[in-house]
Amino acid sequence: MTNAEPAFQTPSVAAAFAAFPEPARPHLLGLRRLILETATQTPGVGALQEVLKWGQPAYLTEQSKSGSTIRLGVPKTGGVALYTHCQTTLISDFRAILPDAFRYEGNRAILLDTGEPLQEDRLRMFIASALTYHLRKRVS
C-alpha cells in the first residue's frame, strides 16, 4: 500500500474517526492502516469489511471468515485500544509470547499509550493472528 490513507468504506466509519479526540486519532488511524495493510499481505484473509460495532470502527473477514473481528477505540483509562472478541485466545496467546510488549486488558484488548510510537512489527503479528484466527482453529 502507499502512504495515502485508504478511503473509508462508509461515512459512519469516517465520522467515528473524525470524532476521536486528539491525540488518540493519529494512533487509531495508524492502527487502521496496519490492519488494512496486514490483511492484504496475509494469505487467506481476503477483503475486509470496515463497519461500526458498538460505535467503534471494526474490521471483519466477512468474505473469507478467516478471522475474528478487530475493533478500535479509546478506553476510559486513556490511550487507544485494539479490541478482540473476549472468548478467543488471541490476547492470552499473544501475552504468553510477548508478556511485556504491551499493556493488556484481560482477554479483550491491547492498550497503547498515545505518547509512544506504534510498535508496528509486533502489532502486525497480532493483527495477522486475529485475521487468521478461525483458519488456525480449524487446523487445530
Image (spheres, helix red, strand yellow):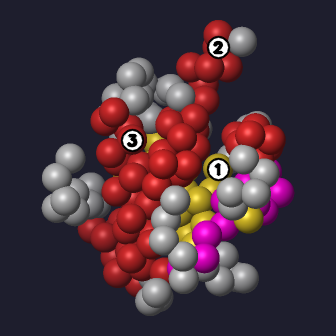
Q: Mark 3 points at which residue?
A: 38
Nearer mark to the viewer, of 3 and 2: 3
* Left or right side of 57 for 15: left
Residues at marks 1 and 3 touching, judged by CB atoms closer than 8 Å: no
**Residue 28: percent from left, percent from top:** 45, 69
Circle number at residue 3: none
> From this viewpoint, is residue 55 visible?
no
**Residue 15: percent from left, percent from top:** 34, 76
Q: Quadrant of residue 104?
A: bottom right
Q: Give the extent of the magenta segment.
A: 104-114
**Residue 100: percent from left, percent from top:** 76, 57
Q: Gap between marks 2 and 1, in whole Å?
A: 18 Å
Q: Mark 1 points at which residue?
A: 84
Q: Callout 3: few (<14), some (14-19), or many (20+) C-alpha neighbours within 10 Å? A: many
Q: Mark 2 points at which residue?
A: 138
Q: Earlier in the sequence, mark 2 or mark 1?
A: 1
Q: Gap between marks 1 and 3, in whole Å?
A: 16 Å
What is the secondary structure assignment of the residue under circle 1?
A: strand
* Left or right side of 51 for 111: right
Q: Residue at x 37, y 68 (%)?
A: 29
